[in-house]
Amino acid sequence: MPLLLLKAPPVRGPKGKGKGRASERRESHLADFILKESVVRLFGEFDRIGNGTVAGLEVRDGLPYGVTLEESDPS
């Protein structure tokens, strides 16, 4: 089942300190690489919910930390 992404304006929390300019990741040239566990869990939640809406996504240090999903009515 394809993942449908809808465009919605981002909602930002309190502004924190930046870490400076991000450099390119060493893995970016690879055809395949290992995902962090938090990313794997997030995709697992997308698979579990099927159709629905991501009502909120908290990101810390560039990785998903918390997600609020709203399941769609299966009818």
Image (cartoon, grey):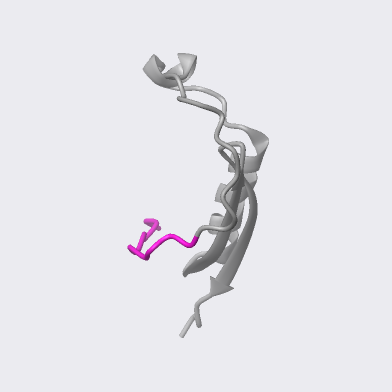
Residue under the image location 42 percent in, 19 percent down: 24
Q: Residue at x 56, y 63 (%)?
A: 56
35 vs 59, nearest the viewer: 59
Q: Is residue 4 above or below residue 28?
A: below
Q: Residue at x 66, y 36 (%)?
A: 37
Residue 72 on the magenta segment: no
Q: In front: 55, or 44?
A: 55
Vertical order, 35 against 24 (above or below)? below
Q: Nearer the viewer, residue 14 or 7?
A: 14
Q: x%, y% of residue 42? A: 59, 49
Furthest-bottom residue in view?
75
The residue under the point 45% across, 22% down is 32
Q: Is residue 69 left or right of residue 23?
A: right
Q: Is residue 2 above or below residue 19?
A: below
Question: Where is residue 47 drawn, in percent x and y?
Answer: 54, 56
Percent x, y of residue 27: 47, 17
- Judging depth in this view, the residue of 22 and 55 nearest the camera is 22
For this orientation, the residue located farthest to the left is 7
Which corner quadrant of the image does residue 68 belong to?
Answer: bottom right
Magenta part mainly helix, strand or loop?
Answer: loop
Check the image and report above or below for 65 versus 68.
Answer: above
In magenta, the rendered stretch is 1-11
x, y percent for residue 19: 56, 29
Quadrant housing the N terminus: bottom left
